[in-house]
Image (cartoon, rainbow, N blue to C red):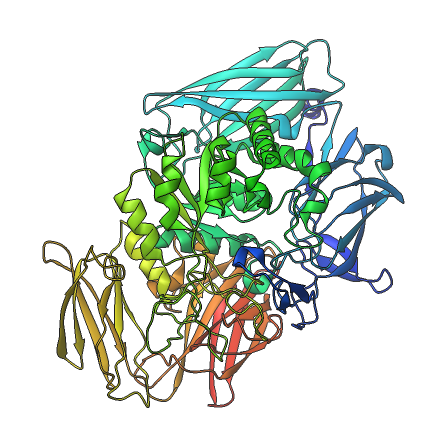
Amino acid sequence: MTLALALSSMCQAQSRKVINLPSWDFSRDGKAWQQVAVPHDWAISGPFDKKWDLQMVAIEQNGETEKTEKSGRSGALPWIGEGMYKMNWTAPKGYKRAVLVFDGAMSQPVVSVNGKEAGKWAYGYNAFRIDITPFIQFGKSNLIEVHLNNVEESSRWYPGGGLYRPVSVELYGNENFSTWDTFVRTLKADKQEAEVEVNALLEGKTGKSGKTVIALLNEAGKKVAEQIVTGANPEIKTTLKVANPQLWSPESPYLYQVKLTRYEGKKVADVQTLKTGIRTIAVSKEYGFQLNGVTRKLKGVCLHHDLGPLGAAENKAALIRQIKMMKQMGCDAIRTAHNMPSTMQMEICDSLGMMVMAESFDMWIYPKCKNGYANFFKEWSDKDITNLVKHHRNHPSIIMWSIGNEIPEQWSQEGVQIAKHLQDLCHQYDPSRPVTQGMDKAEDALKSGFAQVMDVPGFNYRVHKYYKNIEQLPQGFLLGSETASTVSSRGVYKFPVVVSDKATYPDGQCSSYDTEYCSWSNLPDDDWKMQDDYSWVIGEFVWTGYDYLGEPTPYDTYWPSRSSYFGICDLAGLPKDRYYMYRARWNEHQHTTHLLPHWNWKGREGQVTPVYCYTDGVEGELFVNGKSQGRVRKDKSSRLDRYRLRWNNVKYEPGEIRVVTYNQYGDKVGEDVKRTAGEPAQMKFSVETPDHEPIACMVEGCTDEHNVLLNADGNDLAFITVSLQDKDGNECPLADDELTFEVSGAGTFKAACNGDATSLEPFTQPQMKLFSGKLVVIVQSSKQKGDIILKVKDSKRNIEKSITLQAI
């Protein structure tokens, strides 16, 4: 037995090892240090204050010509300034090389090892690798330090601060596959057969002989294809033929595993494994956008990188919650606006089935803000594009690259040349995907030839210009790369109900009737008309899927206002009414019938209070306290009635409104009811544990009766939506009581958020007011198994409720 083990070890060289580095010491001044868990956002605890990054600017994208005070433009949180991280890391014996991998560090990271600068990067959103072999001693403790510096007016939204994405170290022996040089792509595929090309590059002390075994495994771990490449050539290229492949799509996100094994003699020198999907993408004048040979229109949303009350600090459960909520709405694509995505986010999109436009820059040479990326573009843009593409090109979820957003150089020949150069660079490292960017000045971009250069011409807003745009595009199609920018506050309704591109109110809120948008944008209805009526519009990416910190348009100069109103879901991740408007159009597998507004309007008795219904049905009948208000049918000729059902002359009376909806055959689709609530008398919990549920819980209205599980890994999260109800179980949509939270057992209170863009309550303190009757409490597991008890108390009404979660 001892001899067998010895022989086994002789056949195994020191193959690669990846070690996560989650525990660091952090300081803002280099004197006072605290231990933190990475990913970490140093600013999210606040406090909110208009002094943080107070900007006096004219926002050209908004058509402004005079500078005004933008108090919450970048979130009104203390992300400006320096931050330092350090840790002592013992490098294991037996390895020859070590590479530090940062998935993102905000911002301008400088990395030192044992007191010597080992490397640096400029862009806070990009992943980068630093070979620290010359600076460390294997078998001994090594000091790793990271210095970060966030300067004022370097962002148009909240970027966060710190090591906000994971950090790891990769260890290698004498010979290994260069991690980012392994590239797997589908050459062709149908249901009968697929051809998958694998490229790899060996580095280190490669021997004169050797072989590489490249295997493709299915989800059950069974080998479905294999090729063996022999010889000392460090560049490896082969094609795998796969019979009866399972094709990746949003509807069926099947993942294979590619396993590369390098042998030197009988010894295994290195093993690299990665997940991939077999799928084809194409875009053309004749067929539009195609996935696996099937034409489909992109039903996408734009997402900023912050996770609401968690800030920029990345968390798997929070990302899963985002993607599941969007998929339940029927969304099939996201645009990572306006920056590089993270590894974790792309892995989740791969596994859950979400197509991705992976974006790079918000600016090139011309600055949109004083200290933005324009300061680095000339020196760093090629390096950043290279890292973006090589890092992420194996993700089947990514269907196109974006090289910019609303770049001011659209009008110039210099801009045309930059666009062509960056697109060519993407093609160099990934010939399998098209390249796009979001253009906001259609006339300038078309006159200069800027738009004509792109594989996929993407236009932000100005949907009424699509007709003229398409006449000048040799591509024969265009994409709504950023659409809508409709604004609303969850559960807030304004009267009279009007369509407006400049509405503001004294309370700093926007109406949830979904008739308000920005001067440059439009209503969802306008985008859908173009997509339905013209095959050359290949889809859209709505601004935005979720509210995000910073950029509080239309309240850029209003204080307090520190987060956006664009979201289909609010900052807490709760769906607004508009969520159901998109779901009614996009989700082809579930019927939707959603009634608005709420029906609690004391003082409006007898006054006109319009009622809307978002449904996939074509007709509906509304009842007020049992009395029919008539049947309404969707009207293709009317802007607001083509995709909505509206009863515009309903007069408010307390009680109940009920709608019944029907399809084109007269069959019932669904119904919805809103009732006037009495005084709050009880508390309701709705629980989401995203890593344990097939869909986001809030959409289906789950209860707290089910078994609530969390992973006892110190990172998993539960999202508990808290609301108040009257004695009959009717939700109280106007409740704004302050609640307090207490967590005990095998978990901790992480954060709370109510979705109110004007709230200055810190997310990380265990108390918060309800907004439009709701808020979300986030509970984090510890590393021990056991029960986690959340207690929520409303002292004003002497209401208290607890729930027990289980960490396993």
The quarter in which the N terminus is drawn is: top right
> What residue lies at 85% left-to-right and 41% top-to-bottom?
117
- Relative image position of residue 195 (x, y in whole percent): 43, 19
Residue 552 visible in image: yes
- Relative image position of residue 241 (x, y in whole percent): 43, 17
Q: Is residue 494 left or right of residue 460?
A: left
> How many numbered marks, from 0 up?
0
Q: Is residue 636 left or right of residue 791?
A: left
Residue 729 found in image quarter:
bottom left
- Relative image position of residue 257 (x, y in whole percent): 50, 30
Is 648 or 360 nearer to us in this picture? 648
> What residue lies at 73% left-to-right and 61% top-to-bottom?
80
- Relative image position of residue 183 (x, y in whole percent): 56, 26
Note whether 194 is above or below 791 in the view shown: above
Note whether 102 is above or below 63 in the view shown: above
> What residue lies at 49% left-to-right and 16% top-to-bottom?
239
Residue 95 visible in image: no
Residue farthest toward the right in the current orientation of the protein: 115
Q: Is residue 614 left or right of residue 384?
A: left
> What residue lies at 55% left-to-right and 70% top-to-bottom?
752
Is 447 or 155 nearer to us in this picture? 447
